[in-house]
Image: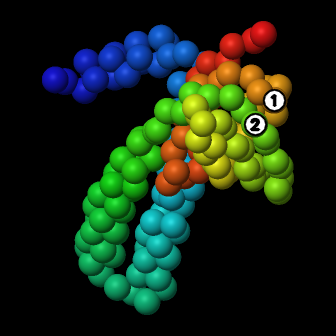
Amino acid sequence: MSLKQRFAESFARSKTMSGPEKKANEILGKIILKKTIVPIVIMLIVLFGGIYLHINGWVTFGINIVIAVISFFVIRKQSEKYQNFTPYVGTLVSLEKRDKNNYVAIIKQGKKPIKLEIRYGGEDLERIRRNQLIQVSYNAESKMAIVVTNNNR
């Protein structure tokens, strides 16, 4: 599969995404972007350190390539962890706002209440009334909740 075909598939998939999928994609992109800042800063430090200490350019280039390859595999492995969502369907019992972006939601799924600590996506739950039936996709690794559907009564 060529690069052009991959781009076309990715573009078509982004056009047919629903609202929650777009929001999840945007949040995951921001989280992964934050993870890429550290390797870029290290690469700049190596580059300017090599210039300042008069190290051969090929050595600094090789070190930067090694940093780039290692960071690629580390970030790819971390991004795979962020793709595992667990669906929860139930009634929203309570939603507590702890900090600016931290929430604690209790969803009753059958007779079993489930406590979700949410860092990303809690603002969507603020618009939902108590004891309303909702479907939430939750990632425990990043503490992200995406409201998939809600039934208005």
At 66% from the left and 38% from the top, the residue drawn is 107
Tag 1 secondary structure: loop
Q: Which residue is mark 1?
A: 130
Q: Nearer the viewer, residue 80 or 127?
A: 127
Q: Position of residue 57 (x, y in %)?
A: 31, 75
Q: What count of labels does the image hold?
A: 2
Q: Nearer the viewer, residue 132 or 46?
A: 132
Quarter of the image for the C terminus: give it: top right
Mark 2, other Cα within 10 Å: few <14 / some 14–19 / many ≥20: some
Q: Which residue is mark 2?
A: 93
Residue at the far bottom: name it: 53
Q: Disc 1 vs disc 2: Cβ atoms closer than 8 Å?
A: yes
Task: Examine the image and state in which quarter residue 75 appears.
Answer: bottom left
Q: Position of residue 44 (x, y in %)?
A: 49, 69
Task: Examine the image and state in which quarter residue 150 appears.
Answer: top right
At 62% from the left and 28% from the top, the residue drawn is 90
